[in-house]
Every structure is written in structure tokens, then in C-alpha cells.
Image: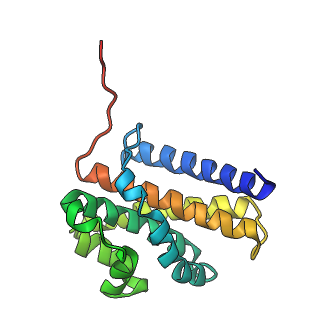
Amino acid sequence: MDNTQELVKGFGERVRNDLMGFLVGKGAVDAHLPECPDVEEKWPEIARSYLPDGAREFKDYPVVSLGWMMFVGMAMAWHWDTDWEANSSRTDYYTALRDMRGYDNMDEAVVEDVLGCKGEEAEKVTTLVSECAARVYSLLLHDKVEPGTEVAFGVYVTALHQLYLAGVAVGLKSLGYHMTPLNNS
């Protein structure tokens, strides 16, 4: 593994640990995170379709650029829960979400139109995502990665991936999936 890969991998681990510690503390996820390989398999195509929009927006709106991916993960958990047989063959998840209300309002599209949250519940979801995205942005700033480099691109994509996974975990828990250890004794 070269130095760039090591830096990116280490950053991903820090982001994952920070996000999951924060989310467990908020009660938004269980200590044992869910595994959802069906949704994880969709990450590469979602990343490819999101990167042009996300990277463009990052310069002026970094927290939005990061946070929108957590909303995508939450929507994916909902799609998985409602009818994965019908949804699994789709390849346009991100563009369909974006096109519901446009990129700038994708948070509202996911929270209100997909997840069905209204009022105070919608505000709580939006605040949680905003806090997670701000935490990840802070980690990016503290790593002092030089913009425009291979490392910068790698840590950005890794940050998005961890936010996607966090969104999936939060979404699954909100749908009633709880990960608890089985006691076989």
C-alpha cells in the first residue's frame, strides 16, 4: 500500500470512529452497526453519479456537499426496506433523488418525500445530518490535506462513503432494525 492509500485509509477509519461514536451517543444507531451488503454494493454507482455535483459544491458549501451523501444513505435504507426486489436493479438512485427538488433541496426531498418526516421530526433528522457533516468537515480541515491532490480526492470520496454508510445505519435503525448481540448460552 502506498502512502496515499495509507493516508486515505487512516482518514476513513478516523471518520468512521468519530461518526459512529457520535451517532451511538445520540441514540441514532446501535453500538453494533448493521451490515447491509445489498445497499453497500450500490456505493460505486452512487459515488460516480454524485461526484460531479458534490465536488463542484464542496468549495462553497462543504458541509452540504458532505451531508447530502448521508441523506442518500438514509434514502437507500428506505428503498431497501420497502421493496428491494423492485429497487435493486435501479442505477439512478442519486439522480432520481436530486431531480425530485433539485440539488439544493435534496435534503427536503429525502426527509419529507422519501422518509415521510414532517415538522419537528424532519428538523431533528436534518440537524443530525448537519452535525455529522460538520464533524467530518472538521476532520478534513484538521488533516490539512492540500487541495487538488490525489490525497484530497481520496479523503473526500472516503468521507462521502463513511457518511453514506452512516446514513444507511441511521435509516435502518429509524425503520426499526436493531442490532443486538445474540446470547447463545
The residue furthest top is 185
> In the image shown, does 184 or 17 lie closer to the viewer?
184
Residue in the image at 35% along x and 86% along y: 99
Q: Where is 169 relative to 110, above or below?
A: above
- In the shown orientation, is residue 7 left or right of residue 67? right
Q: Position of residue 31 (x, y in %)?
A: 41, 37
Q: Is residue 67 above or below residue 4?
A: below
Q: Residue at x 33, y 81 (%)?
A: 96
Image quadrant in which you'd find residue 147? bottom right
Residue 137 in the image: state x and y as whole percent: 61, 65
**Count of numbered labels shown in the rendering:** 0
Front-lying residue, 54 or 2: 2
Image side of residue 115 versus residue 60, left or right: left
> Which is more toward the observer, 47 or 57?
47
Q: Residue at x 25, y 67 (%)?
A: 87
**Residue displayed at 42% across by 56% down:** 40
Position of 91 relative to 85 (above/below): below
Where residue 141 appears, as percent x and y from the top left, is 70, 64
Find residue 75 and report its image quarter.
Answer: bottom left
Colour mapping: rainbow
Q: Is residue 158 above or below residue 116?
A: above
* Quarter of the rendering occupied by the C terminus: top left
Residue 104: where, in percent of width, then height?
43, 85
Name which quarter of the figure residue 145 lies in. Answer: bottom right
